[in-house]
């Protein structure tokens, strides 16, 4: 039962994320903010596919324990692409709110992202081992969590300052994603059932990309109405 439900969920999620991303890239019409958001959604879906596809295959065949190496490599790739996801989201923030300068802030984003990638590359992670050390899962997620926290604060402040209704919950989607993810990092090996928190974590990311898609759709619709009103005049 788990194999069927989880596989259907993963297929729906990956299809939605990549499809929304492609639609946003195609529909951005030169709007850099939405083009970046579309790239972000594609990176999210494509990166997660490296882990979720072999996981679904393992669940539907001989079990996860027989695909430790493939699942480990998938988790490693996903860890890198999720870091890229947050760097792109930072640039969405800059584009949406017309932020100029703040070079130290940009440097901080790249330092945290770089530390995350370096820590993910360390052999001590033992990605392809069934007994990968939990402590390295904590190490590599410290700069990742700080990067996420930084993006949360930035979106919360600017959305409130600009009364940005379309992006008013962006900060919450990121908080939720980390809130569901951190227990998995800390305790999933000891209590496998905690791994189920990855489902609401994924839903939080779906909410993130749908915020961007809906904002683009509403903006496009508003532009159409403005053009129609101008033609009537």
Image (spheres, helix red, strand yellow):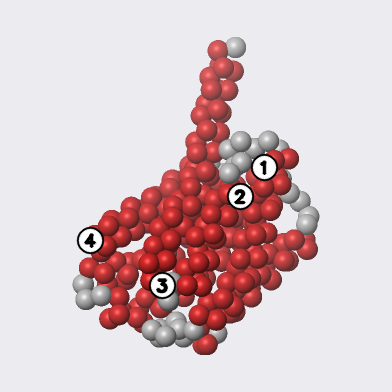
Provide residue 6's location: percent of width, then percent of height: 30, 60
* Alpha carbon distance from label 2 to label 3: 29 Å
Compare marks 2 and 4 and give the one earlier in the sequence.
4
Identify the mark at residue 1; answer none if there is no mark: 4
Label 3 environment density (alpha carbons within 10 Å; few <14, some 14–19, many ≥20): few
Look at the image and tell me in which quarter the N terminus lies: bottom left
From the image, tell me which residue sits under label 1: 159
- Observer-nearest of 98 and 191: 191
- Disc 2 + disc 1, Cβ < 8 Å: yes
Compare marks 2 and 1 and give the one earlier in the sequence.
1
Provide residue 20's location: percent of width, then percent of height: 43, 48
Can you tell which of label 2 and label 4 is closer to the viewer?
Answer: 4
* Alpha carbon distance from label 1 to label 3: 38 Å
* Alpha carbon distance from label 1 to label 4: 42 Å
Label 1 environment density (alpha carbons within 10 Å; few <14, some 14–19, many ≥20): many
Q: Residue at x 65, y 60 (%)?
A: 149
Compare marks 1 and 3 and give the one earlier in the sequence.
1
Label 4 environment density (alpha carbons within 10 Å; few <14, some 14–19, many ≥20): few
* Alpha carbon distance from label 2 to label 4: 34 Å
Compare marks 2 and 3 and give the one earlier in the sequence.
2
């Amino acid at each position: 039962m788990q194999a069927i439900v989880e596989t259907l969920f993963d297929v729906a999620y990956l299809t939605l994320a990549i499809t929304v991303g492609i639609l946003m890239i195609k529909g951005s019409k030169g709007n850099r903010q939405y083009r970046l958001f579309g790239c972000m959604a594609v990176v999210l879906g494509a990166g997660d596919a490296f882990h979720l596809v072999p996981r679904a295959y393992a669940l539907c065949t001989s079990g996860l324990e027989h695909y430790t190496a493939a699942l480990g490599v998938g988790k490693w790739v996903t860890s890198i692409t999720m870091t890229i996801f947050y760097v792109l989201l930072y640039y969405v923030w800059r584009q949406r709110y017309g932020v100029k300068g703040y070079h130290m802030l940009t440097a901080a984003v790249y330092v945290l992202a770089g530390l995350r990638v370096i820590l993910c590359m360390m052999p001590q992670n033992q990605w392809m081992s069934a007994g990968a050390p939990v402590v390295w899962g904590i190490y590599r997620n410290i700069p990742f969590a700080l990067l996420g926290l930084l993006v949360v604060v930035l979106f919360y402040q600017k959305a409130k300052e600009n009364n940005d209704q379309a992006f008013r919950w962006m900060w919450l989607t990121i908080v939720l994603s980390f809130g569901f993810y951190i227990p998995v990092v800390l305790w999933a090996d000891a209590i496998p059932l905690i791994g189920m928190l990855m489902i609401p974590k994924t839903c939080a990311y779906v909410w993130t990309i749908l915020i961007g898609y809906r904002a683009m759709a509403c903006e496009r619709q508003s532009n159409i109405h403005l053009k129609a009103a101008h033609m009537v005049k």
